[in-house]
Image (cartoon, rainbow, N blue to C red):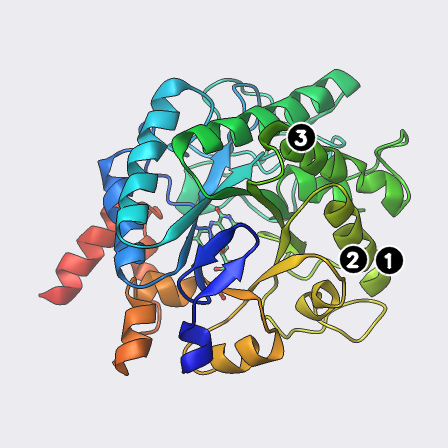
Amino acid sequence: MSDVMQAIQFKSIEVPNRFALAPMTRTSAEPDGTPNGLMADHYEGYAKGGFGLVITEGTYTDDKASQGYANQPGIINEAQIAGWKTIVDRVHAAGSKILVQLMHAGAQFQANRYTDQPLGPSEIIPKGAPLGFYGDQTEWKTPRAMTEADIQTVIDGFAQSAINAKAAGFDGVEIHGANGYLLNQFLSTYFNRREDEYGGPLENRLRLVAEVVRAVRNAVGEDFTVGIRLSQGTVTDPDFQLPEGESGFRQIVEAVRDAGADFVHTTDGDVNRKHFVKGDQSLAGVAASVTGIGLILNGNIDETNCQDVANQFPGALLAVGKKALANPDFVQRLKDGKEIADIDFAMLQPKATISNELAWRRQNAA
Ligand SMILES: Cc1cc2nc3c(=O)[nH]c(=O)nc-3n(C[C@H](O)[C@H](O)[C@H](O)COP(=O)(O)O)c2cc1C
């Protein structure tokens, strides 16, 4: 297991091993979006459990329509920055690095303390139903199609949030361009029905994504790590495919690289899933074929395949979700050859909060 446990230089960050905690929303911040002590214990636990890199849950970027869930953290004011700083300091003290995931919910909007009106590329609601474990909403609200002024506000929100992340001491930011949230909606032919320069052909649909990356890069300078998470699928439509297939995905990766991204973080049901309408590679494979961009890979990475994935993609970080929830000390257990548990989704019920997880742990320890 030497490779996967070896320290790696990932852009400007030295990561003590190849493992990253995948970003996971826990709706456990204060109602005003301030990160709290419960969250600090939670993230510190993953650092102590051996994850070389912690990626935080999706964190909202403005006081307009970016928040998607009740008790979601933000990074837009002094109190929120201070809350994150405590978390960053504790993760660093435990020897790990930490990125904040910057997220705009767009049409995938369940609760927002600033507005009742979601925004999206077009007046299209997500497929399926709202996620019960993030709130009580049972129906989507129809978004308002964004104006050029709304688009500028979104870009400015990401850029200012990245500046705030730097102030909080984060090692970098991950822009959320995956899973059906706003930036992913612009890339999607399901959500994006626009007829202006942000809709239609892929070079238009990826315009906002590239503009956000460029604005964030310009805001934080060259030395701060900036990346973006990308997927085809969404949380309620995991099998969605880009009509442009593999070459379209390559075009997106090249565009974000050229806009100043240091890395892309691909996520799919399985890291090796080959799921393009045109082409025979995985998302990870396509991203790896683009030169000059770092990689974080996600999708069913566990104790049985991590070394193979690490060998297949030298230099990539491996982001672990469900196995990390089940084993916050996943990396340490792997090192020690200890048993690794499978996830019991009861730990995220009835809501995916940290307190419910702790209650589940107390019950299951007894
Ligand atoms: C409770 C929960 C919350 C999640 N929240 C986020 C999130 O905030 N941002 C994100 O990009 N992905 C989120 N995801 C997706 C995970 O990061 C990851 O992509 C998914 O669990 C698949 O990886 P795995 O096969 O290792 O579990 C979440 C997943 C779970 C289970």
The image quadrant where one finds the N terminus is bottom left
> Which residue occupies 42% across, 66% down?
17
Helix or strand or loop: what does disc 3 sit on? helix
Amino acid type assigned to the residue bearing label 2 in the image: Phe
Q: Quadrant of residue 275?
A: bottom right
Q: According to the image, label 3 marks what residue?
A: 218
Q: Residues within 10 Å of mark 3 (few under 14, many from 20)?
A: few
In this view, 89 is above or below 274: above
Q: Please tell me whether mark 1 sits on a helix, a strand or a loop.
A: loop
Circle 3 or circle 1, nearest the eye: 3
* Disc 2 C-beta below 8 A from ligand 1: no
Q: Are marks 2 and 1 in contact (CB under 8 Å)?
A: yes
Give residue 5's position: percent from left, percent from top.
40, 73
Query: CB at mark 3 closer than 8 A to ligand 1?
Result: no
The residue wearing badge 1 is 244
In front here: 135 or 211? Answer: 211
Q: Nearer the viewer, residue 91 or 340?
A: 91
